Image: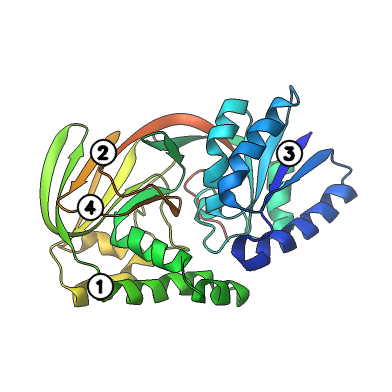
Amino acid sequence: MYLFVINPRSGGGAGRRAWLRAEKRLKERAVEYEALHTESASGAGREVMRALKRREKWSACVVVGGDGTIHSVLAAVLAGGVPLGILPAGSGNDTARGFGIPLEPEAALDAVLDGAAAPADLLLAGDSYTLTAVASGFDAQVAGNVNASRYKRVCNALHAGPLAYLIGVLQTLTSFKPCGASVALDGREQRFEDVWLASVCNLPSYGGGLLIAPQARPDDGRLDVCVVHGCSRMQLLRLMPTVLKGSHVSLPFVTMLRGTSAAIRFDREQPAIGDGESLGRSALAVRCEPGALRVLTPRAAGPGRTGP
């Protein structure tokens, strides 16, 4: 029996459309399932926890939604001891990309039903689990502005989710002020001035395909940190296109670090997000939890492989 968690509002209604197509395939294949509809990512975790406790054996918990909905059920899925399946239907879908999961609903469903459960690391920030990245500073402020905007809904309706992020970058660029920060990796501290962002990554991309940490893999027991520092607003703006291919890592004002734990402390409070969801504005301490999760992926793909 599969538990499907559907957020019909994700991706501007993409969640509802993806579920209609997936449900048809489930009936064609005579698969036993239960559908749990949630109106918000924030409430999904509690509902999944209750559902998983009602039955001793579930084949998997399958999220039909975006990265935020996936984020909200991670703790429940871990507590239930079941694999995570993903039918991507958000504006970014970076979790699916990181695991080589197709973005088309029927193909993603086939990966759930016929694929393999691959071990995956998780990031633990405080008491919150994150699968893609924990970002702080400029990126987090962009996400906050995008989530509060009207243009996000318009972009989702046009199936142009990444465009909302780029609009958010331009919006945030006019008001954000960088500051100094200390980054401690496995206890070894480094000091950076004029830090725009510090992102602790488990998967290569966020923001709808921005390759902020192109070498990151969710099955290596390590986290990848990207620090952008000491650059002007114009340099930051010019950096954005390079992130699409991951070539920003060679720029002099980008520092890439790797380890098993990271602590980031800004001189001035900055927002932080995990999987695009707010983690508040406090100092960040992030630890890699190796192999904590199992994710259903296509047999030909694996963690760190890019989907279509």
Find the distance from the CA under tag 4 to the CA under tag 2.
17 Å
The kind of residue on which mark 2 rests is Ala
User: In this image, 70 relative to 238: left or right?
Assistant: right
Which numbered marker is on residue 147?
A: none
Residue 65 position, x and y percent, is 63, 54
Q: How is the image coloured?
A: rainbow
Quarter-wise, where is residue 250 in the image? bottom left
* Quarter the N terminus occupies: top right
**Residue 81: percent from the left, percent from the top?**
61, 26
Can you identify the residue that label 1 sits on?
175
Q: At label 4, which amino acid type do we have?
A: Glu
Between residue 69 and residue 294, name the one nearer to us.
69
Q: Sequence-wise, which precedes: disc 4 or disc 2? A: 2
Pinpoint residue 109: horizontal percent, then vertical percent: 72, 50
Closer to the eye: label 3 or 1: 1
Q: Which mark is residue 3?
A: 3
Give the residue type at disc 1: Ser
Say few, some or many: other residues with alpha carbon within 10 Å of mark 3 (under 14 / 14 to 19 / 20 or more).
many
Distance, label 2 to label 1, CA atoms, is 27 Å
**Disc 1 to disc 4, how far (Cα)?**
15 Å
Name the residue tied to disc 2: 262
In percent of the image, x 41 and y 52: which residue is there? 204
Which residue: 58% across, 55% down? 66
Pick whichever of labels 3 and 1 is earlier in the sequence.
Answer: 3
**In this rendering, position of residue 71 left or right of residue 270:** right
Is 204 situated left or right of 15 in this image?
Answer: left
The residue labelled by disc 4 is 269
> Few, some or many C-alpha atoms within 10 Å of disc 4 (few <14, some 14-19, many ≥20)?
some
Amino acid type, label 3: Leu
Q: What separation in Å lies between label 4 and label 3 (alpha carbons)? A: 40 Å
